[in-house]
Amino acid sequence: MKRLLLLFLLCLLLLTGCAPRQLEEDLLVIVLTVDRLETGDVTVSVKAPRNASGESADDKYLTVEATGCSFSDAITMLNAATPRPLNFSQVREVIIGENAAKQEDFARLLQQIDALPRFRCSAAVIVTKGEAKAFSKAQKPYLGTRLSRYTETTLSNYAGKGFTPKTTLCDGVRDLGYGFCDPLFILGAVNDFSESVPDTHEKTLDNEAGALPRKSAESVEVFGAAATDGVRVSGYLTGYEMALLHLMEGHVEALSLRDPHGNAVRVTALRPTEVRVDVRRTPIRLSVRVFCEGQHTPGFTPDAEYLKDLIQKDISDLISHMQSLRCDGFGFGRVAVRQFLTIQDWEQLHWRDAYCQAETDVKVLLTLREN
């Protein structure tokens, strides 16, 4: 029996003995960035750990880039110029500059990225203001030492609180132009803090990445979302708008509001929103019923009617904003399509145009509870 066990262990060593050597010979990509230049050319860069340990945090990661007339040409040049094979199985972030994200071939770009050998399609997609390469360069693991672990924890934290979406590359490829809910991508930016940014909003969260009223050693910001219109990125949503979307979906962690007297309340969802789409009307009508609870400090009961009206108005404004961007980011299309028996009947509706011109009816049911 012992001999059989020893033989089994030796077989395992023989089967797995080449793996460490293979990993050492590959360049393990952690971050992939894509930028579209003013000339129309495409620049692709990758960030990967160095095999040799460096003295500083910057020395721990190697950045390689290449430019071509298209994404395919840039990737080909990158492979030719890199001394080791590129391994995309560990990619944590796909960062796309705003100029590339606003092109009509944005969906095709996502498909080309997903088609790269062994690409990790569960990687988060970040659409950044300015250049993606600059965003990646500014991104450093201030907490901990591994960039891969740091980025996963940071993005999960913001999405969990409700400030950003959770869209992966898989989600984007599946839904952009093909689904009944337009994907929302994480919005990123680099804040250089060169100017004092006044908080002119009634709600602090009603800001986008790159303009948050804060000071920090970390200049990279992920906050809000990049909205799509079935073809490309058509505009941006603030962190507060994303929190309202998460509230409508039935989960949010960090939506805090105040009444005119300064009483604070933490708003959470009681259950997912009831959604109806009346396609028999002209224009069609989008109806939502939002069920939420406000938790407040004992002895300081906030004005429930004021808060209910505030949330109701803000959700109406959010839907109107997404209509102006031609973005069905909440997924009204998934409800509307169920009312049609054939694809031909659905296509005759011209959903995108009908959605953008639709009337909205928002009702918020808010209950208060002492925290």
Image (spheres, grey):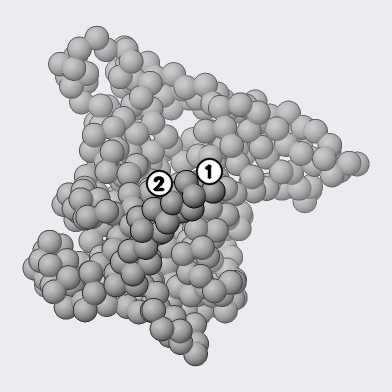
Mark 1 and mark 2: Cα distance apart in space: 51 Å
Task: Please provide percent x and percent y for residue 345.
Answer: 19, 14
Q: Residues within 10 Å of mark 1 (few under 14, many from 20)?
A: few
Q: Which amino acid, mark 2? A: Thr
Q: Residue at x 61, y 58 (%)?
A: 204
User: Circle 2 sits in a helix, a strand or a loop, which is it?
Assistant: loop
Q: Residue at x 27, y 53 (%)?
A: 118
From the image, tell me which residue sits under label 1.
1
Q: To which quarter of the image does residue 116 belong?
A: bottom left
Question: Which label was assigned to residue 319?
Answer: none
Q: Is residue 79 among the parts visible in the rendering?
A: yes
Task: Please provide percent x and percent y for residue 81.
Answer: 16, 78
Q: Residue at x 38, y 67 (%)?
A: 20
* Drawn side of residue 229 relative to residue 158, left or right: left
Q: To which quarter of the image does residue 45 belong?
A: bottom left
Q: Is residue 226 above or below residue 51?
A: above
Q: Residue furthest right?
A: 299
From the image, tell me which residue sits under label 2.
167
Q: To which quarter of the image does residue 18 belong?
A: bottom left
Q: Residue at x 68, y 47 (%)?
A: 257
In the foreground, 151 or 192: 151
- Closer to the chain start, of discs 1 and 2, is 1
Task: Please provide percent x and percent y for residue 270.
Answer: 65, 28
Q: Residues within 10 Å of mark 2 (few under 14, many from 20)?
A: some
Q: Is residue 97 among the parts visible in the rendering?
A: no
Quarter of the image containing the C terminus? top right
